[in-house]
Amino acid sequence: MITGFLFRALDKKAIWVALALLAVAVLVPLSNAMLPINHPLHVPTHIMALFGKYLCYAMLALALDLVWGYCGILSLGHGAFFALGGYAMGMYLMRQIGTRGVYGHPILPDFMVFLNWKELPWFWFGFDMFWFAMLMVLFVPGLLAFVFGWFAFRSRVNGVYLSIITQAMTYALLLAFFRNEMGFGGNNGLTDFKDILGYSVQAQETRAALFAATAIGLAIAFVLCSGIVNSRYGKVLVSVRDAESRTRFIGYRVEHIKLFAFVVSAMIAGIAGALYVPQVGIINPGEFAPANSIEVVIWTAVGGRGTLIGPIIGAVAVNFGKSYFTAAFPEFWLFALGALFVATTLFLPKGIVGLFNEGWTRLRSGREADRAEETLQPGTEAAE
Amino acid sequence: MTEKLTKSLLYLDGVSVSFDGFKAINELSLTVEHGEMRAIIGPNGAGKTTMMDIITGKTRPDSGTVLFEGDIDLTRHDESAIALLGIGRKFQKPTVFESHTVEDNLELALKRDHGIFATLFTDTSSEQKERIDEILETIRLGHRRSELAADLSHGQKQWLEIGMLLAQDPKLLLVDEPVAGMTDAETIETAKLLREIAGEKAVIVVEHDMTFIRDLDVKVTVLAEGSVLAEGSLDHVSADERVIESYLGR
Ligand SMILES: Nc1ncnc2c1ncn2[C@@H]1O[C@H](COP(=O)(O)OP(=O)(O)O)[C@@H](O)[C@H]1O
Ligand SMILES: [Mg+2]
């Protein structure tokens, strides 16, 4: 049963991707730590940190693609799940600061002391324990997705309407988290982290470990998604995307099918956010910005939606482009991103991966045609 | 409710539904017996598709009784629940899962546990695979089993959809305009196919094509303006003056 799931999950493609990610998880930190700085294969710490960030984005895009590419649910609010996972991790990191804060309070984070709060709000309890925080990384985005999806899918909210309410959801959270009274640091968010599991977040070794954890996390998420989409459940997801009412009339509970994918996707997004926060050193309400969620859609579309590798390639490629552009021509980045999205929609509906697949097929059929011609040659001569 | 109100498989009585004041179905009453095949004809807009929408839970009637197997009130269930009760439906416009193969389309429709857990973890058994082979043979698509449904011809898509109904193993099949857009040869084959299915399962066929109805050779119900105008053999209803006036004469 579970073995059947794993067997389906680890098809040829998934094995290659997982192995590649594991190789990255080992080799990049090794090169960073072992090779001398002037060695051509040395990966500097800032580059490793940058790519660690990209891999978090890739995991977020993978999560989005599970619901959008496979089930047709265009969520414009996935940034919210990412941010919630990030906040859960941020809360753990805040509790690790202890007396090292500016005000030196043993329990309360600085911003609470600043607001004259006397004790820790109830929802901060337990976050000093890593396992509890990690549970919340999964639970909070999962619960939000469950409640939201329960109502939306049962009332059969579809298409543009669903996209709009997901966007409203992340916007509402943005406004809520901006408020100081919410107890999440308001405008400034959570920052000035010191330790994670007892290791300094600034230390090079910790950064390397976080990078490796992200690459491994992405590999696991990939295999999980591969198992899901290769199962009969995955085929039902695609059926819902292509002919929702047909799926209902066969006897599938479409609202349950959607809800499950939505919750799993939100949890993956939450993990991505949790891996992101210690690497960038801050989480603030800006992560809930509607524009962030829209960017995830663009990465996925550019990479190729409805494939599992597409969103990963898209997220890394577009963000690499963004880093380059914002350094070279900062004012043009948004235009470039917009143009990229329009061009993809018009000319590359299947994204970068679609382009490769097409090229590959053409190459192969070309070769086959050549071979066919060769074998035909004698026959045609004989006929003449 | 313990006693059965009717022995019929499907029992509609005094069913009405209106859309923005327009009565699409008006005091419709109809019964279909176990294993019976029934043809339903009627002019465009007579309410044939709407009637199927009511039976399959897509549309709720404003008033009236809709019973399945004597005591199941269909108006209280939704589409997927009704499908699981044993009512299969072919749409007027053929709808198959275009990005799945012919075989996968049938595999997905197969009657079994459709829950999340089962769909994630259980494999298709060898009996189920045999059943798929049988259906492929019945719908004459064995040679195209691993092709995408999108690549089928219009007529083949209609057959695949009927095959999906068979895989569902329902007690009642509702088939909306199965031969629309088919060639003559395909039409004849389809009539044969439906006759093969009937007997074991009850079938309601909606169709415009009179030669096709004649080929089926079953009891005919004529629908007009949302209610039953006449019922009986095709010859009997074609002789009815009101039928001629409202439909056949035009
Ligand atoms: N969802 C709906 N909203 C409004 N009017 C509808 C709806 N469904 C059907 N109708 C109307 O009800 C009438 C019967 O339609 P239909 O059942 O499709 O006819 P038939 O299948 O017999 O050609 C038509 O006039 C149609 O316009
Ligand atoms: Mg109709």
Image (cartoon, rainbow, N blue to C red):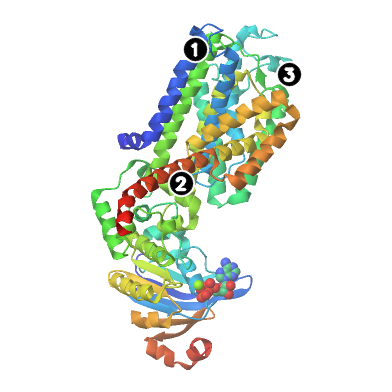
On the question of residue A131 being in view, the answer is: no
Question: Cβ–Cβ below 8 Å for labels 1 and 3?
Answer: no
User: What residue is shown with label 2?
Assistant: A257
Task: Read off the chain for label 2.
Answer: A
Q: Which of A261 and A7 is in front in this view?
A: A7
Question: Cβ–Cβ below 8 Å for labels 3 and 2?
Answer: no
Say what amino acid the circle numbered 3 marks. Leu
For disc 3, does the CB lie below 8 Å from ligand 1?
no
Say what amino acid the circle numbered 2 marks. Ile
Secondary structure at numbered mark 2: helix
Secondary structure at numbered mark 3: loop
Task: Look at the picture and state if A113 lies above or below B164.
Answer: above
Task: Read off the chain for label 3.
Answer: A
State the image quarter where residue B236 is shown. Answer: bottom left
User: What residue is shown with label 1?
Assistant: A31
Q: Which of marks 2 and 1 is nearer the N terminus?
A: 1
Q: Are there few (<14), some (14-19), or many (20+) residues within 10 Å of tag 2?
A: many
For the N terminus of chain A, the image quarter is top left
Q: Which of marks 3 and 2 is nearer the N terminus?
A: 3
User: What residue is shown with label 3?
Assistant: A115
Q: In this view, does B73 lie to the left or right of A279?
A: left
Q: Which of marks 1 and 3 is in front?
A: 1
Q: Is residue A273 left or right of residue B169?
A: right
Q: Are there few (<14), some (14-19), or many (20+) residues within 10 Å of tag 3?
A: few
For disc 2, does the CB lie below 8 Å from ligand 1?
no
Residue at x-position 45% and y-position 32%: A222
Q: Cα distance, mark 1 to mark 3?
A: 45 Å
Q: Which of marks 1 and 3 is nearer the N terminus?
A: 1
Task: Look at the picture and state if B128 lies above or below A134.
Answer: below
State the image quarter where residue B225 is shown. Answer: bottom right
